[in-house]
Image (cartoon, rainbow, N blue to C red):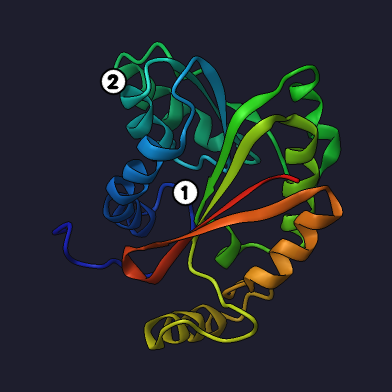
Amino acid sequence: MSTLEKPPLDPYPLSPYVAWAGNRNRDPILEVFKEKLPKSEGYVLEFASGSGMHINYFAPHFQHLSFQPSDMNEEVFENIGQLTQQTNLKNVQPPIKLDLTQPQTWSVLIGKKFDAIFCINIFQVAPISVADGMMNCTANHLSDRGSLFIYGPFKVDGAYTTPSNEEFDRTLLSYGVPEWGLKDITDITRTSQKYGLDLKEKVDMPGNNIILIYGFR
């Protein structure tokens, strides 16, 4: 299949659709990270790493940072490890099980602080309740000057930002999965504020996506 040919929608981390989307968005995200991630030694956590395509693509560009992949689905751990081995990366740690809806799984992070945390393309195929777990976990494990980066398509104040996002949302809703659908930045930010995190910046990205950057007040 050509990299230009869009596969059918399938949020499973190892699906052709996810690989297609990841290949399309990784370079624009990398450019933002080159500007925003810490310039000195530090630690970076990825929520919902999925196949590991993003963390293993970004890590070679930041040899001074140690990257920690995580996911709720242990089935993807082998794929993450294989990608790390293929690129012979020394700054990507073995993946850990982390379910943002199950706080008991966060015990693997006890005593750890991260200078940056990021999450890519989760909210359109996850319940909005994930935001509560994400912000709670972030508030406990983000360093004082660290940032949380959330990438994806979103609604703003209940409205679509583009016709293509409205069409994408209609496609998601047509599958009849209750938690699928574009989420509103307002709702995510309202949740973040419960945990002392504010929306510091919105970065417009190609394909009508946005990077939301949260940090402590």
Q: Residue at x 80, y 33 (%)?
A: 140
78 left or right, relative to 130: left
181 left or right, relative to 81: right
Residue type, mark 1 in image: Pro
Asked whether 147 or 187 is in front, the reply is: 147
Q: Is residue 200 above or below residue 168?
A: above
Q: Can residue 10 be seen in this view?
A: no
Q: Is residue 99 visible?
A: yes
Where is residue 116 drawn, in percent x and y? 57, 33
**Which image quadrant for residue 75?**
top right
Q: Is residue 70 above or below residue 217?
A: above
Residue type, mark 2 in image: Gln
Q: Residue 86 carries which label?
A: 2
- For the residue labelled by badge 1, is the local secondary structure a helix, a strand or a loop? loop
Where is residue 193 drawn, in percent x and y? 80, 56
Quadrant in which the N terminus is drawn? bottom left
Q: Tag 1: Cα neighbours inside 10 Å, few (<14), some, or many (≥20)?
A: some
Which residue extends farthest front? 217
Asked whether 89 or 42 is in front, the reply is: 42
27 left or right, relative to 216: left
Q: Earlier in the sequence, mark 1 or mark 2?
A: 1
Distance from disc 1 to disc 2, alpha carbons, whole Å, reads 19 Å
The residue that label 1 is drawn on is 13
125 left or right, relative to 87: right
Where is residue 39 drawn, in percent x and y? 44, 23
Asked if the residues shown at circle 1 and circle 2 are in contact, with their CB atoms under 8 angstroms apart, the answer is no
- For the residue labelled by badge 2, is the local secondary structure a helix, a strand or a loop? helix
Q: Which residue is drawn at 78% across and 39% down?
A: 139
Q: Residue at x 74, y 30 (%)?
A: 141
Q: Is residue 217 above or below residue 129?
A: above
**Which image quadrant for residue 182?**
bottom right
**Which image quadrant for residue 107?**
top right
